[in-house]
Amino acid sequence: MITRQRVEGEVQYNNGEFAEVLTFGIEGIEKDLALETIQIHCEDTGDTPEQFRQRFPVGTTLSILTITEITRNRVRRALQSNSGGPSSPELRRSVRSKLGAAIRAQRQSWDTALSIQEITGYAGDIYAFVAEMAGALKDDEAIPDDLVDDLILSTSMPKLPPGSTSQTPRDQ
């Protein structure tokens, strides 16, 4: 089972190495409630400390999407049924290969999002925007022209396409 939770957060602190963000609910029973403080680390973004401070200045409101996968705990059975044990060379090679591919895909996604930001001059959090669109559009759904136009012409987050179940983030 996969759950998605949309919240907003306000940057409370940023020293260039990490930022602390106070999150609050925007839907359901958590609407307008302070939830938790999370940290965003510069090393996870590829930014320099100065770029990180500029991207997440204190007082900025962020749109945050959390995706949680909930599964039954099957780790013990899987390890017991693996005749080579939990650290067999085959298992390590397989996991290393898949992890490397996932990391490369994520980095490519970040690079592509940054190029969109450079082309459009988008002043919002491009990573949050892309994550929002990934959650709002179906896999085979075309990206609407009006959404592309809004992104090009706007310095704030464009509205979601019609029919999306997501709420539009508050203006920053």
Image: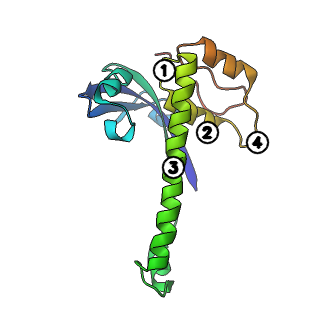
- Of callouts 1 and 4, the N-terminal one: 1
**Is the Cβ of the residue at disc 2 closer than 8 Å to that at disc 1?**
no
150 sits left or right of 13 in the view: right
Instruction: Give the residue at x 46% y 65%.
Output: 96
Mark 2 falls on what kind of element? Answer: helix
Classify 10 Å Cα crowding around label 3: few (below 14), some (14-19), many (20 and above). Answer: few
Tag 4 residue? 140
What quarter of the picture does the N terminus occupy? Answer: bottom right
Tag 3 residue? 104
In 3D space, how far apart are the residues under numbered discs 4 and 2 (Cα atoms)? 12 Å
Residue 143 image point, x, y percent? 72, 30
Classify 10 Å Cα crowding around label 2: few (below 14), some (14-19), many (20 and above). Answer: some
At label 2, the amino acid type is Gly
Q: Quadrant of residue 18?
A: top left
Q: Which mark is residue 124?
A: 1
Tag 2 residue? 135
Nearer to us: label 2 or label 1: 1
Q: Looking at this view, is 41 or 8 the one in front?
A: 41
Mark 1 falls on what kind of element? Answer: loop
Classify 10 Å Cα crowding around label 1: few (below 14), some (14-19), many (20 and above). Answer: many
Instruction: Give the residue at x 26% y 27%.
Output: 14
**Is the Cβ of the residue at disc 1 closer than 8 Å to that at disc 4?**
no
At label 3, the amino acid type is Arg
- Of callouts 1 and 3, the N-terminal one: 3
Q: Quadrant of residue 56?
A: top left
Residue 114 image point, x, y percent? 51, 29
Instruction: Give the residue at x 50% y 19%.
Output: 170
In 3D space, how far apart are the residues under numbered discs 1 and 3 (Cα atoms)? 24 Å
- Of callouts 4 and 3, the N-terminal one: 3
